[in-house]
Each structure stands twice: as C-alpha cells, then as structure tokens.
C-alpha cells in the first residue's frame, strides 16, 4: 500500500505551496486517474511518490518504508514514466540489457511484444527517435519492468491513435490485485475507460477522491435537450442544441461517466459535489 | 534479504550501465587527452628548438619541458574530469532517470568517483607514455644527430626532474625535501580534485565555472582554517607558532611539519567527499535551495 501522509511541498520553500497538507492512500488493484489543470501539482505528486522530491513536511511510504530514502528495494517496485523522455545514445538492445537487469521482474519478451504492438522496430538508436517514438519506448520498457507501482505522467502525449488504443489495452491486461497504476493526465478522453479511481486536484488540494463506481452511484451523466432536466441538473455544460448535464442519481440508473464534465463540476463547485457524496 | 546500502552485484551492474551510457563521453575525453598530449609533446621540441643542437650532458633536454607541461596538464585534466563527476545529473530529465534507477546512493557515488576521479589518472599516464614514445619516434626526423632523444623515465616524471636521468630511486626516497615537495603536490592535486567533485555534486551543470569562482573565496577560507588548525595542533604539543616558516622547520623538523600538514589535508579531502556523497543523497529532480 502506498500512503501519502500530510505532505506539503513548495518549490520555492515560501509562499503558497504546490502540495498542501495532502493525504492519500493508494490500495493495490487500482488504476488511479490523477486529473487537474496545468500547474496544480500532478507531476509534483508523482515525483514525491518516487522520492525525487523531499516533502517540506509529511512523508510518502510504500509498505511502511519512506520512499524518499530511495532504497533499491523500494525503487525496484516503482517506475515513473515522466512527461518528457530522455533516452541515451544507445541501441535499443543495449539499453534493455543495461537497464532491465535492475528490475527483478523485467521481461525481455514483454518488452519486444510491446514494441511490436507500438509498431517499433527493434533495431533503433534511441536518441534518433521522435518524441512520440521515445514515449513508446519508455512506455514499453515501463510495462516490461512489471513493477508493483507504475506512475505515468501524461502517458498519451505524443502517441498516435493506435498507440493510445494499445496503451489502454495494456493497462487493462496488466492490472492485477497487487499492482497500482497512477495516470496523471489532462487528456481525460484517452484514459476515461480504464480508470477505476478518480482524483481531481486543484490549487494544491484534492477536490474529489472517489472510485468510478461511487461516482456512478451518486451521479448520472447524460446529454439532453430537455430544458426541465437541464434546470434540475447540479451541473450543466451547454452546447449546440442542448447540454451535457450531471444529475443526482436518485434512481440508481446506469450512465457512462463523463470525466470532462465531472472535472469541470469539481473545479467550479467542489463543495456542492462533495455534499452530494456525503448525503 | 536485499542489501540496500551496498551490493556487489548491483554495483557491477551499475558500473556496466554507467560505462555503457557514457561511453561516448569517455571515448571523447580519452581521445582528447591523448591528442592534446601528443600535440604538445610533438610541437614543443619544434617551438623550443631543443633538438637542433647536440646534447652536452647525455640527457634529453626535452624532459625538463615535458615534465612541466605534464604537471600543468595533469592538474587541468584532473580538475576538468572531477568537475564532470556528476554530469549524469545535470538536467531534470537525466536526474529523474538516474535517481530512480534501483541502485543505492553509495553504489552510484562510488561508480561516478571510479570513472571520473580514479580512472582519469590511468588514462592520463597511459597518454603520457604514448605521447612521449611518439616524440621519441618522430623527433629524429628533424633533430641534430648529436641530440639525445630518450623516453622520459617515470622516476624523472614523479620526482619533478629531481632525478636527472638516473633511474636509481634510492637518492629520491632518502631526500626528505624532495619527498615533502612531491607529497605536497599530490595532496594539493587530490584536494583540488575533491573540491571540484563537490562542486559537481552541488552544480552538476556548471561545475567548472562555479568551481573556479568559488575556489578563490574557498581558498582564502581553506588557508585560514589550515593556518589556525596548524597553530592549534602545534600549541597542543607545546610548540610555538611562528610566521616565518624557516623558523618553524628548524624548531620541529620537516617530517613532523609535513605529517601535520598531510593529516589536516587528508581530513579535509575526506570531508569534501563525504559532503559530495551527502549532496548526492539529498539530490532532487529539480535544483532547489
């Protein structure tokens, strides 16, 4: 279990902190979507989890061990795919043989399988690749490491449509009861189908921390032109000829989660949103 | 059970990984050092004209000039290499990759030191021998027939020219003054190396520039600390401290003086490396003060 306890972090050590008294527990078997506008602290949170940043107060622990210690036994359980990928000037095979050995569960077969899925040749020199290709290599390597915790910062940035589909497929196939995936993104449409836990951040706070099932139990999402429904909605985003709305789910109806709408609602009126869940 | 502090298996893996990912830089540096040494040893006789007339004492007249040039280049190359010790951490992207690699800080630190602080001496002295031999092969092309052209003996090199072609080292090791000067130079070199390694840990991106700028201020502080440390130690042993070094030597003797000097220097050098290690341990993905 990954536990973030009362973490505060400020890049400049003064002023408004980027992460302010943040607490969160990530349980095994979950695919967490970390959503928020630019600059709210999503990448900062991921780096705190890996031990790349020292919280000004609080701590992040993995099975009771502080991740900031950066012990090898902790690091080989966590893999971070950052937003910007830097790869050395090496052939792919050389890179795999040099770096894969550090991860106990690394699988070369998985690596090549993912590369094939992404449509990449094995005979490539890494620093000659485009940004999208580097992202594919990084994702393939991250997947092949089979670490317990996989953190991905904007993983679908730079990916073409088939690659996005392959990425979603990998997440679904690779998820297991003992793994945690955290996907930080503002491209919610790319990942909305694969998330089972939603975290929305804004102004260094968590606005919502709920499972998809909990959200769908309490809220109903639909597109409608019915003015009376639009009137009753707790949140509405008007469009051409109608609106996308959120209603309280009093009847227990099924509806598909509209993450973009939920995000807008959470940012606009977080108190009302949380009062619905508390009721 | 995993050893999180140091594992020989993981250390070997990290050495392999570090060498593999930096092999281009190391190759460039090695070829650069070799090229510079060959250029200097080849061009120096031509500039100085020392082979254009016969040697009168049976000694190669280039040795003295080579020895000065090698000493200067050694200091320069060692400093540049030390300032690159933590260049794998000079950008946010590289730092994320390097810090999250599952190896301990000690393994990462030891590997960086091995390649950038220790191996540089092997590369340099191998380069010296190769460059010197090339001089010996090429100089006869333009030299006077009476000119003496011989490879520089290592004893001449390491004695700063004290042994004038005589490879008998017994004279060297019996002379306290020569030993003292040699050890003084070596500890000075190691001290500068440790200092620039620390600068590399603090400013991986601009270690050379920041290092040189801070060296001036730190040299003043360092010499002041050394001065007062020395005075304190001497007072503890009931010796008086005088500003004139000749009087100091006469009173305590050279061996005692140099032992105190080396001890203080070695403590400072070890302290600098400990600070470098601590800095690496505390390093974050961004530079934050």
Image: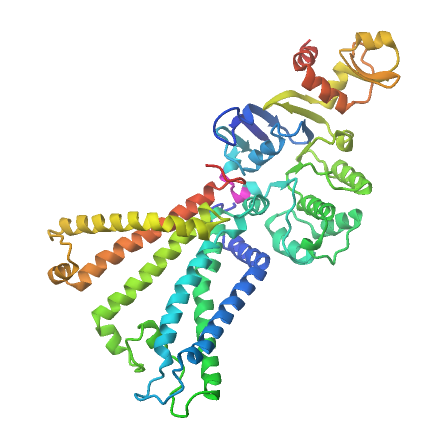
Left of B76 or right of it: where is A262? right
The secondary structure that most of the magenta stretch takes on is: helix
Determine the residue positioned at 75% across, 11% down.
A234
Q: Quadrant of residue A92?
A: bottom right
Would you place residue A122 above or below residue A3 in this image?
below
Q: Is residue A53 magenta?
A: no
Coloration mode: rainbow
Would you place residue A149 above or below residue A3 in this image?
below
Q: Percent x, y for residue B289?
A: 45, 36
Determine the residue positioned at 40% across, 87% down.
B52
Q: In the rendered view of the protein, which quadrant contains the N terminus of chain A?
A: top right
Would you place residue B284 above or below residue B243 in this image?
above
Left of B217 or right of it: where is A197? right
Q: Quadrant of residue B170?
A: bottom left
Q: In the rendered view of the protein, which quadrant contains the C terminus of chain A?
A: top right
User: Can residue B233 be spotted in the picture?
Assistant: yes
Q: Percent x, y for residue A110?
A: 73, 48
- Which span is picked out in magenta? A69-73
Counting the numbered discs, the total is 0
Q: Percent x, y for residue B283?
A: 48, 42
Q: Percent x, y for residue B159?
A: 30, 73
User: Can residue B153 be spotted in the picture?
Assistant: no
Determine the residue positioned at 78% across, 22% down.
A257
Q: Residue furthest bottom?
A: B145
């Amino acid at each position: 279990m990954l536990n973030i306890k009362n973490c505060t972090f400020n890049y400049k050590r003064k002023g408004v902190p980027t992460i302010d008294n943040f607490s969160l527990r990530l349980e095994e078997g979950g695919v967490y979507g970390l959503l928020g506008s630019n600059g709210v602290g999503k990448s900062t949170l991921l780096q705190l989890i890996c031990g790349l940043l020292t919280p000004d107060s609080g701590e992040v622990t993995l099975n009771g061990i502080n991740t900031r210690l950066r012990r090898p036994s902790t690091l080989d359980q966590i893999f971070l795919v950052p937003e910007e990928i830097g790869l050395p000037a090496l052939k792919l095979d050389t890179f795999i043989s040099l770096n894969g050995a550090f991860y106990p569960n690394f699988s070369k077969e998985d690596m090549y399988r993912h590369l094939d899925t992404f449509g990449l040749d094995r005979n490539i020199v890494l620093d000659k690749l485009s940004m999208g290709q580097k992202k594919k290599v990084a994702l393939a390597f991250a997947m092949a490491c089979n670490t317990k915790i996989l953190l991905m910062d904007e993983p679908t940035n730079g990916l073409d449509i088939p690659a996005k589909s392959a990425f979603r497929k990998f997440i679904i196939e690779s998820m297991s009861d003992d793994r945690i995936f955290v996907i930080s993104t503002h491209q919610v449409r790319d990942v909305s189908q694969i998330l089972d836990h939603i975290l929305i951040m804004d102004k260094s706070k968590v606005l919502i921390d709920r499972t998809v099932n909990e959200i769908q139990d309490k809220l109903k999402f639909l597109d409608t032109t019915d003015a009376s429904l639009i009137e009753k909605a707790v949140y509405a985003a008007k469009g051409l000829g109608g609106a996308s709305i959120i209603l309280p789910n009093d009847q227990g109806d099924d509806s598909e989660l509209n993450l973009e709408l939920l995000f807008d609602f959470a940012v606009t009126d977080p108190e009302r949103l949380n009062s619905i869940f508390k009721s | 059970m995993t050893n999180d502090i140091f594992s020989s298996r993981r250390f070997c893996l990290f050495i392999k990984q570090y060498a593999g990912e930096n092999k281009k830089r190391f190759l460039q540096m090695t070829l650069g050092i070799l090229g510079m040494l060959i250029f200097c040893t080849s061009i120096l006789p031509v500039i100085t004209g020392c082979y254009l007339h016969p040697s009168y004492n049976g000694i190669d007249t280039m040795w003295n000039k080579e020895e000065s040039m090698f000493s200067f280049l050694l200091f320069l190359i060692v400093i540049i290499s030390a300032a690159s010790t933590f260049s794998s951490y000079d950008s946010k992207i590289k730092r994320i990759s390097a810090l999250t690699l599952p190896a301990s800080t000690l393994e990462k630190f030891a590997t960086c030191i091995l390649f950038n602080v220790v191996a540089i001496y092997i590369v340099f002295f191998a380069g010296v021998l190769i460059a010197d031999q090339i001089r010996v092969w090429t100089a006869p092309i333009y030299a006077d027939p009476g000119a003496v052209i011989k490879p520089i003996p290592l004893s001449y090199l390491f004695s700063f020219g004290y042994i004038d072609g005589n490879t008998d080292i017994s004279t060297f090791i019996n002379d306290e003054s020569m030993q003292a000067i040699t050890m003084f130079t070596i500890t000075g070199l190691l001290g500068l190396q440790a200092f620039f390694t620390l600068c590399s840990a603090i400013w991986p991106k601009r270690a050379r520039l920041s290092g040189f700028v801070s060296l001036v201020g730190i040299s003043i502080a360092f010499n002041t600390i050394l001065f007062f440390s020395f005075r304190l130690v001497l007072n503890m042993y009931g010796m008086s401290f005088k500003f004139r070094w000749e009087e100091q030597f006469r009173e305590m003797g050279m061996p005692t003086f140099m032992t105190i000097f080396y001890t203080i220097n070695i403590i400072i050098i070890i302290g600098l490396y400990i600070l470098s290690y601590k800095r690496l341990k505390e390093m974050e993905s961004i530079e934050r003060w």
